[in-house]
Amino acid sequence: MADSNLSIKSLRAGYGSLDILNGVDLDVPAGQFVALMGPNGAGKSTLLKTLYGMTTIKDGSIDWRGKNIAGYKSRAILGEGISFVPQGRCNFPVMTVDENLQMAAYTLRDDKVKADRDYVYDLFPILKTRRSTLAGNMSGGEQQLLEVAMAVLQRPKVLLVDEPSVGLSPAAIGIVFDELLRLHAAGQTILLVEQNTKKAMEVAERAVILRLGRVTWDGLPGEISHDELGELFLTGKMRGETEAVH
Ligand SMILES: Nc1ncnc2c1ncn2[C@@H]1O[C@H](COP(=O)(O)OP(=O)(O)OP(=O)(O)O)[C@@H](O)[C@H]1O
């Protein structure tokens, strides 16, 4: 259904007068799990923040369910069904898991809160076993799951996730990515920014590479080797090409 696709066209955005995105074109169809990768400073996090209304948009459009939401405020974007899990963990470390979820549910009607917490606990059984634990006392992986769960509580149509693996042990990364896979299997559209390219390529259906604020490669994870990926990050070129992709 074209209406449920997130369609980014010629998007130019940044911070104040500083442009970071230099004409991003990207369609994210409903239900797809897309990994957005690229070198440091390419603008990956900026793209997620732009989709969530946190940057200055200069040009282009973000078409979503029949509207151009470019320039909407974050709260309005959340209301349109797009949730953002920013980098870093644990918004409320001295609150329990239950209380953190209650905080995340503040935009929902009160009588829905309990039901929504149960909904999230069904999706993330690990969190259910920790519901009375102070969030700050959980492992890094569990804290990251809690952040994802707080976004999922809003029942987003699109989930934007920024580098969930940062600072996590390999075991914790495994737990977080397994949960993302489970969410996707349940129909969740996910746009994931991830530096851990190996892991991202394992879980995502589609790989998109951003370099210098533009999409330079877009395909199936199986279509690109790890070495080619590294070369694209460094040079913007695939092996054998003499010209950069853009
Ligand atoms: N709030 C800000 N104000 C000004 N410049 C910023 C701000 N946030 C990020 N930048 C700059 O924007 C550029 C892109 O940053 P961004 O975080 O989007 O890159 P990234 O591709 O996610 O990189 P990384 O993989 O290192 O996180 C960088 O040069 C960064 O310094």
Image (cartoon, rainbow, N blue to C red):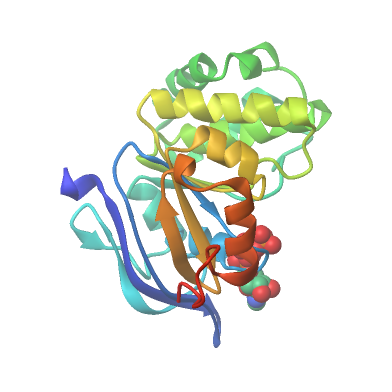
Q: Quadrant of the C terminus?
A: bottom left
Q: Residue furthest right?
A: 137
Q: Quadrant of ligand 1?
A: bottom right
Residue 105 visible in this rendered orientation of the protein: no
Residue 165 visible in this rendered orientation of the protein: yes
Say which of 79 and 202 sits in front: 202
Q: Quadrant of the N terminus?
A: top left
Q: Position of residue 231 (x, y in %)?
A: 62, 61
Tally of numbered tags: 0
Task: Please determine whether, in this image, residue 237 is positioned above or below residue 1.
Answer: below
Q: Residue furthest bottom?
A: 17
The residue positioned 55% from the left and 83% from the top of the image is: 16
Say which of 98 and 155 sits in front: 155
Q: Quadrant of residue 233?
A: bottom right
Q: Quadrant of residue 171?
A: top right
The residue positioned 32% from the left and 50% from the top of the image is: 80
Judge from the rendering whether residue 139 lies leftward or rightward of residue 144; answer left or right. Answer: right
Task: Please determine whether, in this image, residue 4 is positioned above or below residue 229.
Answer: above
Q: Position of residue 4 (x, y in %)?
A: 23, 45
Say which of 109 and 158 sits in front: 158
Q: Position of residue 49 (x, y in %)?
A: 52, 61
The residue positioned 48% from the left and 20% from the top of the image is: 114
Q: Position of residue 219 (x, y in %)?
A: 40, 50
The residue positioned 70% from the left and 32% from the top of the image is: 173
Judge from the rendering whether residue 246 lies leftward or rightward of residue 179; answer left or right. Answer: left
Q: Residue furthest front?
A: 240
